[in-house]
Image: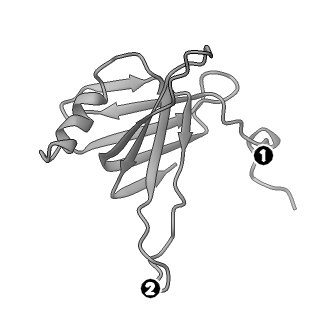
Amino acid sequence: MTSAVSDVERRPLTGRNFRVEIDEGNGRHVEVGCSEVVFPSLAAVRDSWRPDAAELLLLRRAATGGEEFHAWWAKARIGRAPQRRTVTISLIGDDGAGTPMRWRFRNVRPVSLHYSPLNAMGNALLIESRELAFDDVEIG
């Protein structure tokens, strides 16, 4: 019996080439240069024995001083309900053109903002991390 899946499709995917886009809800998509995405554990069903722990998406990148995320987070911090957005993470295939996997997080809102330590003795990049809550995720 032969499989309908080709050998190329069976190759393990690498996680080094990806794109993170935020749909601001006004037709504008902003590509955010992230260096790391940490996916939450995505429970298939709610378990009454398991305490409700927030499933948070974590985005990390080198700090640039840009305002793309900061204004969104600042509104949440002062108690103004920030606009919920859609965040799409697309894995880019080894050929640089294909998209073998895509995660679309819906109704995303900022939860926290964190910066790496400052160290006058080192030369490491300043990394900003954002934790984002969401209502749903579609994987395709």
Question: Looking at the picture, how far across and down is residue 94, in whole percent?
Answer: 70, 26
**Which mark is drawn over residue 49?**
none
Above or below: residue 45 compared with residue 20: below
**Residue at x 15% of width, y 42% of height:** 78
Q: Residue 62's spot in the image, x, y percent?
A: 49, 22
Task: Report the Cα–Cα distance between label 1 and label 2.
Answer: 36 Å
Residue at the far right in the pictured view: 1
Residue 75 seen in the current view: yes
Residue type, label 2: Ser
Q: Which of marks 1 and 2 is in front?
A: 2
Identify the residue shown where x is 49% and y is 79%: 50
Name the side, left or right, on which 77 lies relative to 58. left
Residue plotted at (14% across, 47% down):
79
| Sequence-earlier tag: 1 or 2 | 1
Query: Is residue 86 left or right of 124 when viewed as pictured?
Result: left
Q: Locate residue 11 relative to residue 69 in the image: left or right.
A: right
Quadrant containing the N terminus is bottom right
Q: Which residue does the numbered mark 2 point to in the structure image?
A: 48
Give the camera-side residue of 7 and 138. Answer: 138
Element carrying mark 1: helix
Element type at mark 2: loop
Give 44 or 63, whichever is nearer the viewer: 63
Q: Name the residue under label 1.
A: 10
Q: In this view, does 95 lie to the left or right of 73?
A: right
Front-lying residue, 113 or 49:
113
Amino acid type indicated by mark 1: Arg
> Badge 1: few (under 14), some or many (20 or more) residues near its Cα, within 10 Å?
few
**Crowding near pointer 2: few (<14 within 10 Å), some, many (20+)?**
few
The residue depicted at 37 percent of the width and 57 percent of the height is 136
